[in-house]
Image (spheres, rainbow, N blue to C red):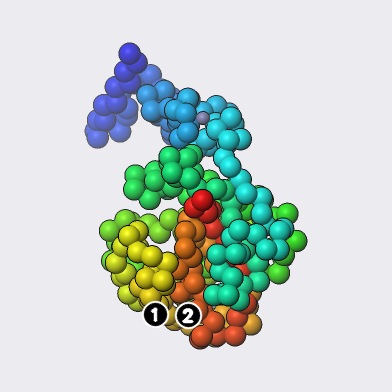
């Protein structure tokens, strides 16, 4: 067991240990190294220790993520969930979301265990894919689906904002936050039918600044697509208030 003992003597302003006094960087690196020794970064998929440039997932778990790669397919499974309900331009999903699957495990860690790095990681991976979509250059800005302020203060972060940050980092697109706002804290959707969900979500969003989005092509971002009721309500709020074009992107699609 390695111990580093720090004793601070205010009189002499010296640390009583063997490190060079004038090297806060070295001290920082040492602490980082020690913390890595005791709290190594583990793969969120298989728990093996991550190496080199690996983040969140080891390379073999990353390769197991069931990517849809559906972003250049005009009528893909993402878009079909909005057919006849939202006049969207393009729709895309990063990976398939199945019960007990790797993506479900990752999103659970993000939302309920506060592992925020999972959100930006997934956003970056998705962004790397979307950069090759032939329509991405037409997008003006990303809008993450907002949480109600009560839910935001309870969770401490909005997972869709973290995903959007990863997407923004790889695509260079700006994020427009706080223009689309959630005005109603809707009850849980899990036990509702698709029609009940749509009804439950109707009117739950408003646009705070109508001018900001006029004539823009927006990419709406959410974590998992199930019935699409939440994204549909967002799109309707945006289209009622402004002259706008909407595309939709989600990290997961429930299958
Ligand atoms: Zn792994």
Q: Is residue 126 left or right of residue 192?
A: right
Front position in the image: 39 or 116: 116
Percent coordinates x, y for residue 63 in the rendering: 61, 35
- Which residue carries the number 1 mark? 203
Question: Which image quarter: residue 169?
Answer: bottom right
At 26% from the left and 30% from the top, the residue drawn is 8
Q: Is mark 1 within 8 Å of ligand 1?
A: no
State the image coordinates of residue 107 (x, y, percent, origin top left).
43, 47
Q: To which quarter of the image does residue 36 belong?
A: top left
Please, is residue 111 above or below residue 80 in the view? above
Residue at image position (43%, 56%) is: 159
Q: Is residue 111 above or below residue 211?
A: above
Mark positioned earlier in the residue sequence (2 or 1): 1
Seen in the picture, residue 56 relative to 242 is either above or below; the reply is above
In the image, taking residue 232 as reference, residue 188 lies left or right, namely left
Q: How many marks?
A: 2
For the residues labelled 2 and 1, say whether their Cβ atoms are less than 8 Å apart. Answer: yes
Location of mark 2 (residue): 237
At a point 51% along the width and 85% down the height, the residue shown is 240
**Callout 2: 10 Å neighbours few (<14), some, many (20+)?**
some
Q: Quadrant of the N terminus?
A: top left
């Amino acid at each position: 067991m390695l111990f580093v003992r720090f004793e601070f003597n205010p009189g002499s302003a010296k640390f009583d240990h063997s490190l060079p006094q004038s090297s806060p960087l070295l001290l920082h690196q040492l602490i980082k190294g020690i913390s890595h020794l005791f709290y190594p970064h583990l793969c969120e998929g298989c728990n093996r220790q991550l190496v080199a440039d690996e983040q969140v997932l080891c390379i073999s778990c990353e390769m197991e993520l069931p990517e849809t790669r559906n972003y250049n397919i005009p009528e893909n499974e993402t878009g079909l969930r909005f057919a006849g309900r939202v006049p969207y331009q393009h729709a895309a999903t990063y990976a398939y979301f199945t019960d007990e699957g790797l993506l479900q495990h990752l999103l659970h860690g993000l939302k309920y265990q506060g592992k925020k790095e999972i959100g930006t990681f997934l956003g970056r991976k998705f962004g790397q894919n979307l950069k090759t979509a032939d329509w991405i250059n037409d997008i003006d800005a990303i809008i993450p689906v907002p949480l109600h302020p009560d839910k935001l203060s309870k969770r401490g972060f909005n997972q869709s904002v973290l995903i959007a940050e990863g997407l923004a980092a790889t695509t260079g697109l700006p994020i427009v936050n706080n223009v689309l706002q959630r005005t109603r804290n809707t009850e849980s959707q899990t036990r509702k039918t698709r029609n009940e969900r749509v009804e439950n979500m109707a009117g739950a969003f408003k646009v705070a600044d109508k001018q900001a989005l006029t004539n823009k092509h927006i990419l709406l971002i959410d974590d998992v697509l199930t019935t699409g009721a939440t994204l549909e309500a967002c799109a309707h709020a945006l289209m009622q208030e402004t002259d706008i074009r909407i595309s939709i992107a989600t990290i997961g699609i429930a299958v």
